[in-house]
Image: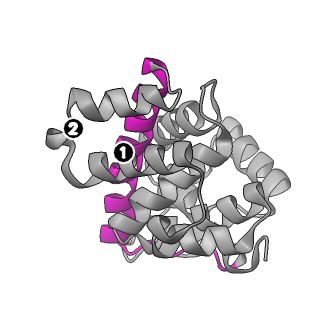
């Protein structure tokens, strides 16, 4: 755990509580790595726990949105916010979940250039609007999503994922968080 993952000197709690060490071991087992974003929060276990609770709920919890759709939203928001860490990490997740390396790259560069169905494009255009100008979201914008089959719960989930990554992107970028090198080669 001594690898510096941000440009800030925030040493991890030492020793880590057993539950935290176990969580990181599960990440290593399932992902083949411990994401640097998790390592970055290890200096303050209350912040670590809050981050993983929100992430796990939004990205892995029950939702009408698929895991791929949520990852695509994460990439669109991260691209708008120019967050290198999240573009790399979540771009890899889009490549893996979609089985399409080109889609992962298009999502990072410009989701509008990606070959998407009308429903997915509507979702991502809405996510981009929320990321860029949430105060401009209107009932017409929400109704357009309903016309594509999104429930009000789905719309809330889109907004919540955008909000989470808007926060996370700023923390990652402003701390100088570096993506794990392994992400660059994943699902290629």
- Expressed as whole percent of the image width and height from the top left, the position of residue 106 reads 56, 73
Label 2 packing within 10 angstroms: few (<14), some (14-19), many (20+): few
Q: Position of residue 43 (x, y in %)?
A: 46, 54
List the single residue furthest toward the top.
152
Q: Residue furthest left?
A: 135
Q: Quadrant of the C terminus?
A: bottom right
Q: Residue at x 60, y 66 (%)?
A: 91
**Quick check: 147 above or below 97?**
above
Identify the residue at image location x=50%, y=60%: 75
**SS label for mark 1:** helix
Residue, disc 1: 126
Q: Residues within 10 Å of mark 1 (few under 14, many from 20)?
A: many
- Residue pointed to by mark 2: 137
Q: Tag on residue 181?
A: none
Relative to the observer, which residue lies in front, 47 or 145?
145
The tag earlier along the polypeptide, 2 or 1, is 1
Q: In the rendered structure, are the residues bearing label 2 and label 1 in contact, judged by CB atoms less than 8 Å apart? A: yes
Q: Quadrant of residue 95?
A: bottom right
Q: Position of residue 32 (x, y in %)?
A: 81, 63
The quarter of the rendered structure image containing the N terminus is bottom right
Residue at point 66%, 60% (across, down): 94
Q: 171 and 142: which one is in front?
A: 142
**Which of the 4 quarters of the picture holds residue 138?**
top left
Range of the magenta residues?
152-181
For label 2, the SS is loop
Q: Is residue 105 magenta?
A: no
């Amino acid at each position: 755990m001594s690898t510096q993952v941000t440009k800030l000197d925030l040493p991890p709690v030492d020793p880590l509580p057993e539950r935290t060490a176990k969580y990181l071991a599960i990440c290593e087992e399932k992902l083949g790595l411990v994401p640097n974003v998790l390592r970055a929060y290890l200096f303050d276990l209350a912040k670590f726990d809050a981050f993983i609770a929100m992430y796990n709920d939004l990205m892995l919890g029950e939702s009408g949105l698929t895991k791929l759709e949520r990852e695509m939203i994460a990439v669109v928001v991260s691209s708008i916010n120019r967050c290198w860490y999240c573009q790399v990490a979540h771009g890899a997740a889009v490549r893996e979940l979609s089985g399409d390396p080109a889609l992962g790259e298009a999502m990072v560069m410009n989701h509008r250039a990606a070959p998407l169905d009308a429903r997915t494009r509507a979702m991502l255009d809405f996510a981009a609007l929320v990321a860029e100008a949430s105060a401009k979201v209107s009932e017409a914008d929400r109704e357009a999503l309903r016309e594509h089959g999104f429930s009000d719960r789905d719309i809330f989930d889109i907004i919540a994922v955008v909000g989470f990554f808007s926060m996370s992107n700023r923390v990652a970028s402003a701390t100088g968080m570096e993506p794990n090198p392994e992400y660059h080669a994943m699902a290629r």
